[in-house]
Amino acid sequence: MAARKVKSKQSTGEQLFAVKHSKIAGRGGFATRDIKKGERVIEYLGERVSHAVADSRYDDRSKRVHHTFLFAVTRQTVIDAAVDGNDARFLNHSCDANCEAIIERSRVFIEAIKDIRKGDEITYDYAYTRDGTEDDEEEYTLYGCRCGAKKCRGTILAPLTKAELKKRAAAAKARHHPKHAVARTGHEA
Ligand SMILES: [Zn+2]
């Protein structure tokens, strides 16, 4: 496999956004200068724990509105930005985002996929992990999205594949509720 050449994109430590009140949800990150497509905005930092530990910390289904700072890095590891996290945890989800989360050597970086103008809110698609048991209420209430994008899919859960849509009906019949905290996911670099 041809390894993608990694240009030196390591952050200079410059903070590229300010955390302020956001119309999308709570607080968000707003660019403090123009950011070019391909620029690395920030690393997603926090305590690295196992999925089991993350699950024990956040039992999503006991909450009315989902709210965690988990990011699933690998099958083994989740980053919990509620512990020792940086400002990356404030970046909001959008279904029409200007950044994406890239996983590189088990680290997570938020990278611009469009040119971003100073003052714009910095967003990425959380594409939360699914465990296959989500029903409509969870999809649109617990994990509902109000990002305001024209192509908003109404949920911060990862888009369903056609196969998953087919399975949905069956899953609704034979429900089981493993305690499973969902987490943001990213793309392998
Ligand atoms: Zn949306």
Image (cartoon, helix red, strand yellow):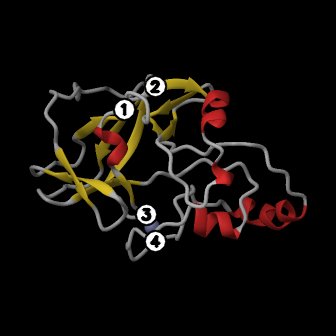
Ranked by sequence position, the earlier of labels 3 and 4 is 3
In this picture, is 103 found above or below 68?
above
Kindly identify which numbered label has been placed on residue 152.
4
The residue type indicated by label 2 comes to: Glu
Q: Which residue is at 59% across, 68% downward?
A: 141
The residue type indicated by label 1 comes to: Gly
The residue type indicated by label 4 comes to: Cys
Alpha carbons under labels 3 and 4: distance apart? 5 Å
Mark 2, mark 3: which one is toward the viewer?
A: 2
Within 8 Å: ligand 1 and the Cβ of disc 3?
yes
**Would residue 189 be visible to someone looking at this image?**
no
Q: Disc 4, disc 2: CB below 8 Å?
A: no
Snapshot quadrant of residue 97: bottom left
Kindly identify which numbered label has been placed on residue 85.
1
Ranked by sequence position, the earlier of labels 2 and 1 is 2
Q: Disc 2, disc 1: CB below 8 Å?
A: yes
Q: Is residue 152 left or right of residue 41?
A: right
Of residues 133 and 162, the one nearer the viewer is: 133
SS for tag 2?
A: strand
- Please tell me how crowded label 2 is: few (under 14), some (14-19), or many (20+) other residues with Cα within 10 Å: some
